[in-house]
Image: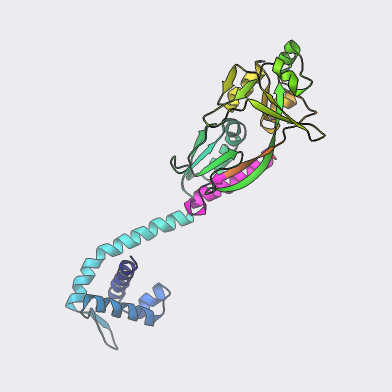
């Protein structure tokens, strides 16, 4: 591959020497030493096995072999120059498609409000949003950026932590008025709970940590499960039962009283990171790197 690269590079220099008529003109154009240009032409002549350029103190002239090679290399020059224009265009403007994957709640509540400003600031970048609470294979589905909750089992992913979240327990005022407010975790055995369940996890065993450090576990009584975070919250609003979720994801519901925190003398023993994730810097285009930074700045503000 290196030999091919050198050959094409030498051929392109030869084309320009022939077109411009001097080694110095090519050296100036490409910011190279004149001796380097001359040496590369000599190497090309050695590869071809014939002299391509007759040198004199006054001018350069092509041999028959040189004229044949000039005609053959014209198409190469067009390809190189066309490719260079494409590269320069992409270097001067941010463009391309960036695919983003995240959970339904984060997508709807925190990602969608950012879309207008991103479209205004980066009009040449196309954004594709995929909201899904199931695990996503970034490589197989060609996802550029993902927002993931929890510890990452795949160490090959590059992650940047946005914040930590801690789960809590919530229900609607209507549900609590009808069924009463649980005073201890054990009381949940007498309550209806709505749980999150997908292909990877079933969150029906809830852990509680008291102020003295003791941890107890209770199995959530349920006959409703969903793999959709938005549906989980909506069913809690409807009064169908108690849910376990991070308070930051239902901040508006808590503020307007649609959902009420319960069992506040206990807390979940574990915190879970919310990460911005990608396959690695080598996989990221300039466009996806730009969106990565914008997402991190925005999400850190609204989720922390």
Q: Residue at x 34, y 68 (%)?
A: 2
From what the image shows, is residue 233 above or below residue 4?
above
Residue 266: x, y in percent?
77, 29
Residue 248: x, y in percent?
69, 33
- Can residue 290 be found in the magenta stretch? yes
Q: Pick the residue in front: 253 or 294.
A: 253
Q: Residue at x 71, y 19 (%)?
A: 188
- Can residue 1 be found in the magenta stretch? no
Residue 103 appears in the picture as rendered: yes
Screen quadrant of the N terminus = bottom left
Q: Pick the residue in front: 271 or 12.
A: 271
Q: Residue at x 58, y 47 (%)?
A: 159
From what the image shows, is residue 248 above or below residue 193?
below
From what the image shows, is residue 280 above or below residue 226?
below
Image-quadrant location for residue 148: top right
Q: Which residues are magenta?
A: 277-303
Residue lying furthest top in this view? 178
């Amino acid at each position: 591959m290196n030999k091919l690269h050198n050959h094409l590079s030498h051929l392109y220099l030869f084309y320009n020497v022939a077109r411009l008529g001097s080694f110095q003109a090519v050296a100036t154009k490409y910011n190279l030493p004149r001796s380097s240009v001359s040496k590369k032409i000599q190497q090309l002549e050695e590869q071809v096995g014939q002299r391509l350029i007759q040198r004199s103190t006054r001018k350069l002239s092509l041999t028959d072999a040189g004229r044949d090679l000039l005609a053959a290399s014209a198409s190469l020059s067009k390809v190189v120059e066309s490719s260079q224009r494409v590269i320069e265009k992409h270097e001067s403007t941010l463009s391309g498609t960036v695919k983003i994957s995240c959970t339904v709640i984060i997508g709807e509540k925190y990602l969608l409000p950012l879309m207008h400003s991103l479209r205004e600031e980066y009009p040449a970048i196309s954004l594709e949003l995929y909201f899904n609470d199931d695990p996503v294979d970034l490589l197989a589905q060609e996802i550029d950026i993902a927002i993931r909750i929890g510890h990452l089992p795949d160490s090959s992913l590059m992650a940047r932590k946005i914040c930590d979240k801690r789960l809590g327990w919530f229900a609607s005022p209507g549900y609590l008025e009808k069924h009463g407010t649980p005073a201890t975790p054990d009381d949940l055995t007498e309550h209806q709970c709505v749980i999150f369940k997908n292909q990877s996890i079933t969150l029906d065993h809830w852990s509680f940590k008291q102020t003295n450090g003791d941890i107890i576990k209770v199995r959530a009584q349920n006959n409703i499960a969903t793999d959709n975070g938005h549906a989980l919250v909506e069913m809690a609003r409807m009064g169908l039962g108690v849910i376990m979720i991070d308070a930051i994801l239902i901040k508006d519901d808590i503020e307007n009283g649609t959902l009420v925190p319960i069992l506040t003398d206990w807390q979940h023993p574990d915190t879970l990171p919310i990460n911005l994730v990608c396959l690695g810097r080598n996989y990221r285009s300039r466009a996806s790197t730009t969106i990565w930074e914008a997402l991190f700045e925005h999400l850190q503000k609204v989720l922390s």
